[in-house]
Amino acid sequence: MGRGTKVAALCALVGMACSGREGPPAEVDAGADAGEGVDASFDADTDAGEGDDAGTDAGPIDAGPLTGDTYLYVLDVIDLGAEGPDGVAPGFDLDGTTDEICRQEDWTSPAPESTPGIDNSLGPILAAGEAEFRVREALALNVSSGRLILLARLRGVDSFEDDPRVELDVLFGVLPDGVFAPMLTGSRYVPGQTFDLDARALDEDGMTALSQLPASIVDGRMQAGPGTLPLTVPFGTELVTLELGQVRLAVDVSEDGLSNGVVGGALDVESTIAVLSDVDGLDPTQVRFALETFADLDPQVGRNDCRSISVALVFDATPAVAGAVVTPE
C-alpha cells in the first residue's frame, strides 16, 4: 500500500472520531513561534540510527561502573516523527532489516546518514493527517501550557563529548504549587525553571526512576536503549499514556540542553487498542482495524500479520531544576 493511500485510509478509519473533537483548551497560549520550534527539531540531524547498528540485538550498554555528574532537562519541543521528502523520516531500524514486513515499507533516515530500513509507521501517518488528528498541535499546546511535562535526567556524566556509560531516567514533571504555567521565551521554556517530580514515575524510595535506559555518549551524541518507556500522546483534550517497547533514543547532549533528539520504539497492538478503547470519541473497532492494518513489527509465524506498530518522535530539551517529589491529586 502506497504511503499516500495509507494516510487516506487511516484518516477515513478514525478521522471522523478525531476531527469532531474540540481539541486542546483554546485559552492555552503556545506562543506564535510554536510551530517553528516543532519543525526545527526535524530539520536537523535526527537520525537515531547513527552510531547504533540500528538493530534490536545490541543488548544493554555495560561499560563499567557509573561515575560522574547528574543533569536534569525538561522537554520543551515534542513532535511526531514526520515524513520528509523522498521517503525520509526519523526513527530506528527496529527489526534490523530493509525488507517489507507485513506489507509495510521502511523509511530512510535524514541526510547525511541516509540510513535505510527505518521503522516509523505511525508517526508519519498521524503527522500527514494533522487536519483530522491534531496530534502535533495538541502536543505543542500541552507542552507549552505545562500540562505535559517530561523530564530527562542524565546520571553518571563524566564528559559530554565521549562517555562510555551514562544512564537516562525519564520522569514526569509537575508544576510547583502556585505556578500555573511554565515561563516561555517564544515557544521554548526559559532555562533553569523548577519542576516537581511526579512520585508515580519513581520507585518507593522516591529517587529511583521506574523508566531507565542505558546509554553512552560518542562525539557529543547520546545513544540510549534498548528498554521501555511511557509514551504520552494527546487525543483532543485527553492525555493517553502508552507503553513503548524496543526503545531506541539518540540526542545531542550538552550542559546547555538536548537537541536534535529522536526516540523510536514499538507499540503492542493489543495493549494499545485496550488503552485507546477508553478514549471518548474513538471507535474501538476502527482503532483495531487501523492499527492491525499498519502494524509493521513482530510478524506472527506463518502469517503476514504483525503484532506491533512502530512510531518515532523528535524532541529538544532545556536545563531544569528538580523540586519536591509529589503525588498529583
Image (spheres, helix red, strand yellow):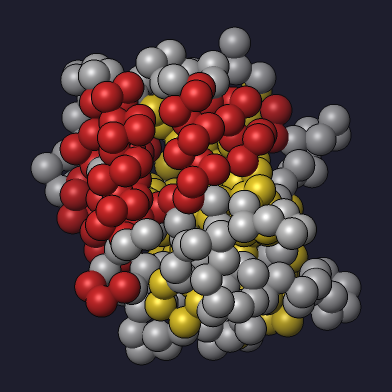
Image quadrant in which the C terminus is located: top right
**Residue at image location 53% in from the left, 32% down from the top:** 288
Horizontal side of residue 105 vs 222, given as left or right: left
Q: Where is residue 184 in the image (x, y as percent from the top left)?
A: 26, 41
Residue 58 location, quadrant:
bottom right
Q: Nearer the viewer, residue 77 or 7?
A: 7
Q: As displayed, is residue 269 above or below residue 167?
A: above
Horizontal side of residue 171 vs 313, given as left or right: right
Q: Which of 4 and 134 is in front in this view?
A: 4
Q: Is residue 197 among what the camera can see?
A: no
Q: Where is residue 112 in the image (x, y as percent from the top left)?
A: 36, 89
Q: Is residue 236 among what the camera can see?
A: yes
Q: As displayed, is residue 210 above or below residue 310?
A: above
Farthest front residue?
302
Residue 201 location, quadrant:
top right
Q: Position of residue 208 (x, y in %)?
A: 79, 43
**Residue at image location 69% in from the left, 65% down from the top:** 225
Image quadrant in which the N terminus is located: bottom left
Horizontal side of residue 128 vs 71, given as left or right: left
Q: Where is residue 190 in the image (x, y as percent from the top left)?
A: 32, 47
Farthest top residue?
329
**Residue at image location 34% in from the left, 84% down from the top:** 111
**Residue at image location 76% in from the left, 42% down from the top:** 210
